[in-house]
Every structure is written in C-alpha cells, then in structure tokens.
Amino acid sequence: MIHARIVGTGSHLPGEPVTNDDLVRRGIDTSDEWITTRSGIRSRHFAEPGCKSSELALIAARRAIEAAGCAADDIDLIIVATSTPDFIFPSTATLLQAGLGIRNGCAAFDVQAVCCGFVYALATAEKFIRSGSHQRALVIGAEVFSSILDWADRSTCVLFGDGAGAVVLEASSEPGVRAMALHADGSYHPLLWVPGNVAGGQVTGDPFVRMDGQAVFKFAVKVLDEVVREVVDLAGVPQDSIDWLVPHQANIRIIQSSAKRLGLPMEKVVTTVSFHGNTSAASIPLALDCAVRDGRIRPGQRVVLEGVGGGFAWGAALIDF
Ligand code: ACO
C-alpha cells in the first residue's frame, strides 16, 4: 500500500515584525491592549507593496525542498493554497514552478479554501500520491493578505499578516497522513469574504476582507473540535496518542477553546499567532515548520492539523511524522 509522508517543511515571513504599537503609530485607531486581549496577536509581518504570494512561496518551497533532501526537479506535483494569488491567471503554482526552475512538466495548480486552504491542498496531494500517479508533491500555503486589508477597518486589519509555509509530501511504504476530513458550508459565506472582483477593467464590488468577527468566532469553536475527533476516529487511533495539535493561527482564544473542548493541554498545541497574526492559508504550514525546526515535532510523533475559514470551509489531518 502506498502512503504519503511529510519529508520536509519550510516557511518564510517577509520583512521585520510589525508590532501592535507600530500599527498605532501608522494611524490605526487601536491599542496593543485591545489586540492582545481579543486575539493574542502581538506582531505580524507584511510584504513590501508589490510583493507577490509566489515570491514568498518560493523561499518557503526552497527551504522545504532542502529539508526533504531532494532536488526541485524531483517534484512532480505542485499545489498552492492561496486567497491572494499573484494574478487572476495563471495559477500561483505555475509561477512558483517557473521560479523554482522546474521544467519537467509536472502538474501545478491552486486551491482556494481560504484559511483551510492548506488542509484542502494537503488532502488533494495525498490522494494523488496514494493513487500511485505521483511520487513527490510540493504543498504550499502562501498569502499577501495585506493586499486585501482595508486599513480603515480596524476590526479586521489588525488581525492578519503575510507569509508562506511549505511541505514536501512523498510516497512511502510507511504510514504518514493517516486520515483527513474536509467540510464546507457555503451558506455562511457572507460572514467572512472579499465580495469583489475585476470585470471590464474595473474593480466590481468590494475588494477588501469583510468579517462578522463574533459569528466567525462561534462557528470556528463549534466545528474545530468536531473535525479533530472525526480524523481521530477515521484513523482508528486513541485521542491521547496525539503528540501535537497544529491549529490554524487566527486567534488564541479560538485555539484555547478548541484545545479545551478536546481535553488537550496547551503544552501540546503549537501556537505562533502571537508573532504571525492570521496568515490564512499560510498559517498551518508556518506553525508546523516552526515546531519542526525548533525540535518540538520529531520523527515518530503524531500530529493533527486543523483549519477553518471563509466559505465556510474547515478540515483536519492526522499525520504520523
Ligand atoms: N481596536 C480597538 N477597538 C476595536 C478594534 C480595534 N482594532 N476593532 C474593533 N474595536 C471595537 C469595536 O468598534 C467595538 O466598539 P463598540 O463596543 O464601542 O462598538 C468593540 O471594539 C468591540 O467590538 P467587537 O467586534 O464586539 O469585539 P469582539 O470582542 O467580538 O472581538 C474579534 C473582535 C477579535 C474580531 C473577535 O470577534 C474574534 O476574534 N473573532 C474571530 C474572528 C477571526 O479570528 N477571524 C479570522 C479569520 S477567520 C479564521 O481564520 C477562522
């Protein structure tokens, strides 16, 4: 039987950290106290104006490929999760492929599931690998979320940041990804969206993130522990065999609440939201890479990834490292 294993991780945060006080200095009517107590965010990173998601993805991808000990040309599938693609088309994945200098003609495409995008991309890649059609996939979450923030809307602009995270997923005879669950309910889409587009050379609608924060909060807390229990059941493993939970990094209160509902101590939860902010599709692979590189997540350990975001779309993966 063919399994799919994560054999390398990488990430990238652009520029210097921007603290909550820096946002106040930039003229946003907020405070470190408000942001920290509501969200747990102390700083985030913003890409330079004009910087594209594929540029952040390229650095994260190179680091993941190096960690995997393979060459870029060994990659035979590229999937990028992003809500802030470089262009309407082509896909950010093909631009990343060109940036990596991969000329082997491998498949490359984007998936769009907002903050759950990385989980959706990983699930897609896992199916390609388990089918035997592909050997080594590069799976990325990359965002320049600052490009869709309304700086006059303090209830959203203080919560998000830019970045990229990547994994190399490889065919193996040993189990890696043991179970995945994906869900969506599009009837909730007006609670968190960017209700705009480009048509006839004009921006139509509203090109900025709009969010009903309290409704998003309640929904996220309700579904996250359910989907973790679902992958634990699907994998047929005891819940107390989970070594690490790597949740989507949107808000420390959402993370704490879902850990509590699962009966997981916070010592087993990877949190990076304090210094990443919410980087949407990049958040889970960024947090994962952080914990792999600082030695918390080690070979042989069991990790659950979980995400929820616009759509609404949510999901989880149970993975043996
Ligand atoms: N600084 C200071 N005051 C602010 C700010 C700010 N940045 N933003 C809003 N306020 C004010 C509001 O104007 C309001 O003032 P008022 O009472 O005088 O009208 C007050 O703070 C309270 O606003 P609420 O919206 O009720 O604040 P709440 O306690 O609900 O916290 C928050 C808002 C942090 C957005 C919270 O609802 C939340 O965390 N929601 C989850 C959303 C989330 O994480 N989204 C990420 C994307 S989705 C995902 O990734 C899962």
Image (spheres, rainbow, N blue to C red):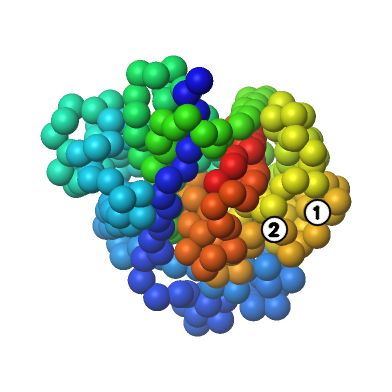
Q: What is the x, y in percent for residue 289?
A: 48, 57
Q: Residue at x 59, y 49 (%)?
A: 300
Q: Which residue is mark 2?
A: 269
Q: What is the x, y in percent for residue 210?
A: 58, 46
In this view, the residue farthest toward the front is 173
Q: Residue at x 42, y 25 (%)?
A: 129
Question: Please, what is the three-letter code of the amino acid marked with disc 2?
Answer: Val
Tags 2 and 1 touching, CB below 8 Å: yes
Q: Which residue is mark 1?
A: 264
Q: Give the CA distance from mark 2 to mark 1.
A: 8 Å
Query: Does residue 309 appear in the picture of this structure?
Result: no
Question: Please, what is the three-letter code of the amino acid marked with disc 1?
Answer: Leu
**Label 1, ligand 1: CB separation under 8 Å:** no
Looking at the image, residue 75 sits to the left or right of residue 114; the answer is left
Looking at the image, residue 222 sits to the left or right of residue 292; the answer is right
Q: Which sits in the foreground, 41 or 172?
A: 172
Q: Which sits in the foreground, 201 or 172?
A: 172
Residue 14 drawn above or below residue 148 = below
Q: Residue at x 67, y 53 (%)?
A: 244
Q: What is the x, y in percent for residue 286?
A: 49, 56
Q: Secondary structure at mark 2?
A: loop
Q: Residue at x 76, y 62 (%)?
A: 266
Q: Quadrant of residue 310?
A: top right
Q: What is the x, y in percent for residue 178?
A: 61, 32
Q: Secondary structure at mark 1?
A: loop
Residue 45 drawn above or below residue 245 = below
Of callouts 2 and 1, the N-terminal one: 1
**Disc number for residue 126:** none
